[in-house]
Image: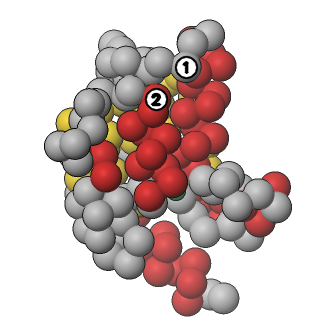
Amino acid sequence: MRLALDEAERAARGGDVPVGAVVLAPDGSTVLASGHNEREVARDPTAHAELLALRRAAAALGQWRLADCTLVVTLEPCTMCAGAIQQSRVDRLVYGARDEKAGAAGSLWDVVRDRRLNHRPEVVEGVLAEECARLLTAFFRDR
Ligand SMILES: [Zn+2]
C-alpha cells in the first residue's frame, strides 16, 4: 500500500485525482506493475489507476489471466474497475479508503463479490485508509 500511495502522489503531481495501484505477483511480494490515475494527463476517461496497473501486469506476465495476483489500490474501485478486476481474475483486492459516493467493492455496490458472478476475489479494505483518504482530501481542498 505504501507503493500505491507513492503512485497516488504521482497522479496528483500531474493534476489527477490521487489514486494509485499496484499488482503483486502470486508470491504476494513481487511487484508486477503499478499505475496511477491519468485521466487528465492522458485525456482518457478509462485511465484509472487500477485499469492501468492491471493492463501492465498482464503485459508483464504475457497473459490476461492474473490468477493468484493481488491488486492493491488506495481507493475503493469504481464500477468500471470492479468489472476489470472481475475480468482479470485477480484473487485478492486490497484497498485503502472507501468511496461512499461511487465505490463498487462494498460501499455503493459490491460488484467484485456479487454471488451471481463466477469469480469473486477476496477483499481486504481499510489498509492505511486514513493516509489514502488524506491525500484525496488535501487534493480537493487545494483545488
Ligand atoms: Zn475506476
Which one is in front, 84 or 75? 84
Q: Position of residue 35 (x, y in %)?
A: 61, 42
Q: Earlier in the sequence, mark 1 or mark 2?
A: 1
Q: Secondary structure at mark 2?
A: helix
Q: CA distance from mark 1 to mark 2?
A: 6 Å
- Give the amino acid at mark 2: Ser
- Residue 104: percent from left, percent from top: 35, 60
Q: Are circles 1 and 2 on residues that touch, CB within 8 Å? A: yes
118 is higher (above) or lower (below) than 35: above
Question: Taking 45 as reference, is 115 left or right?
Answer: left
Q: Is residue 142 positioned above or below 53 on the image?
A: below
Residue most extreme to the front:
116
| The one of 109 and 5 positioned closer to us in this rendering | 109
Which type of secondary structure does the marked residue at label 1 adopt?
loop
Counting from the top left corner in percent of width and height, residue 60 is at 62, 16
Q: Which mark is residue 88?
A: 2
Quadrant of res 70: top left
Residue 131 visible in the current orientation: no
The residue beneath circle 1 is: 64
Residue at image x 55%, y 89%? 141
Q: Quadrant of the C terminus?
A: bottom right
Q: Foreground residue, 127 or 48?
A: 48
Local crowd size for mark 1, using a 10 Å CA cut-off: few (<14), some (14–19), many (≥20): some
Residue 82 seen from this side: yes
Q: Residue at x 33, y 13 (%)?
A: 27
Q: Residue at x 49, y 24 (%)?
A: 31
Rendered view: 107 above or below 21: below
Count numbered badges in the picture.
2
For the N terminus, the image quarter is top left
Q: How far across and down, in percent of the image, does residue 58 sit? A: 58, 21
Asked where in the image residue 110 lies, by quadrant, the reply is: bottom left
Mark 2 closeness class: few <14, some 14–19, many ≥20 residues within 10 Å = many
